[in-house]
Image (cartoon, rainbow, N blue to C red):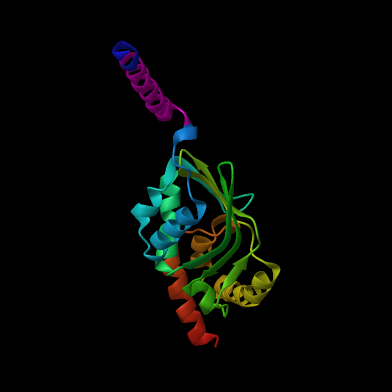
C-alpha cells in the first residue's frame, strides 16, 4: 500500500513537470494579451512622447503604412515619424478596441496636433478600422485607416492656400517639405512646418 501511494505521488510529480514544460513551448498556456491594456500602454507612451518606449513595442522589421504609396519600414523610419509627432505635440485618442487572432482593431482614432490647429482644424477623425498586427506580442505592422471625409474637407482649403503661398514665396522650402509631392515626416520637417506656418500667418492672416 505504501509503495502504491509512492508510485501515485511520483506519477503526479511527473505529470506536473510535463505540463510545466508544455506551457513553455505551447502558446495555449501563455497569458493572453489584453488588447485594451496594450493600446492604453501605447497611448501613455505616445502622450509622453517616449520614443524609445514606443519603439520597444515594435518588431525590428515593423512597418507603418501611411498610404498605398508610402510605407515606413524598420525602427529607424518609425523613429522619424515618432519625432514628427513629438515636435507637433500630437495627442491620440483611441476607442472601440477589439482583437481577432494577432490583429488589434480600433474603431475610432482621433488626433490633435499643432499643425492641424494652425490650419484651423482642432482635431482629425480617422475612419473605422485602424489596425495593429502583432507578432509575439510586438507590433509588426500599423495600418491607419484614412481620414474621414469631413476631416479632410476641414483642413484641405487652408492647406492648399499654404501650398500656393509656399510655391510662390518659398519654392525651395516646399521642395524640402514635400519631396516628390510626398509629405516628409520627421522632427526637422515638423519644426520647419511650424516655422513656415508662423511666417505665413503673419503675411496671410
Q: Nearer the viewer, residue 56 or 30?
A: 30
Examine the image and state in which quarter residue 110 appears: bottom right
**Quarter of the figure with residue 109:** bottom right
As for residue 18 lying within the magenta part, the answer is yes
The residue under the point 51% across, 80% down is 200
In the rendered image, the vertical position of residue 155 relative to residue 130, given as above or below: below
Dominant secondary structure, magenta = helix
Q: Quadrant of the C terminus?
A: bottom right
List the single residue furthest toward the right.
149
Q: Could you say where residue 194 lies in the image, as x and y percent from the top left?
A: 45, 73
Residue 63 percent coordinates (x, y): 51, 45
Residue range of the region highlighted in magenta in the rendering: 6-26
* Horizontal arrangement in the rendering, residue 5 relative to residue 42 (left or right): left
Residue 129 shows in the view: yes
Tell me: 181 left or right of 11.
right
The answer to if 16 sits in the magenta stretch is yes
Q: Quadrant of the N terminus?
A: top left
Q: Compared to 5, does 20 lie above or below?
A: below
Residue 186 visible in the current orientation: no
Amino acid at each position: 500500500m505504501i509503495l502504491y501511494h509512492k508510485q501515485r505521488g511520483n506519477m503526479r510529480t511527473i505529470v506536473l513537470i510535463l505540463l510545466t514544460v508544455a506551457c513553455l513551448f505551447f502558446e495555449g498556456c501563455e497569458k493572453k494579451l489584453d488588447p485594451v491594456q496594450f493600446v492604453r500602454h501605447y497611448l501613455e507612451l505616445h502622450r509622453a512622447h517616449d520614443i524609445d518606449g514606443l519603439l520597444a513595442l515594435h518588431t525590428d522589421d515593423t512597418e507603418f503604412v501611411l498610404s498605398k504609396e508610402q510605407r515606413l519600414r524598420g525602427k529607424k523610419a518609425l523613429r522619424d515619424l515618432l519625432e514628427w509627432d513629438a515636435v507637433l505635440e500630437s495627442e491620440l485618442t483611441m476607442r472601440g478596441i477589439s482583437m481577432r487572432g494577432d490583429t488589434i482593431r480600433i474603431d475610432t482614432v482621433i488626433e490633435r496636433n499643432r499643425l492641424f490647429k494652425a490650419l484651423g482644424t482642432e482635431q482629425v477623425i480617422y475612419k473605422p478600422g485602424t489596425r495593429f498586427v502583432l507578432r509575439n506580442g510586438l507590433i509588426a505592422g500599423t495600418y491607419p485607416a484614412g481620414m474621414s471625409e469631413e476631416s479632410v474637407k476641414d483642413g484641405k482649403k487652408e492647406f492648399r492656400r499654404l501650398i500656393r503661398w509656399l510655391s510662390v514665396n518659398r519654392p525651395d522650402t516646399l521642395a524640402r517639405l514635400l519631396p516628390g509631392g510626398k509629405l516628409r515626416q520627421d522632427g526637422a520637417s515638423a519644426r520647419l512646418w511650424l516655422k513656415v506656418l508662423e511666417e505665413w500667418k503673419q503675411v496671410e492672416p
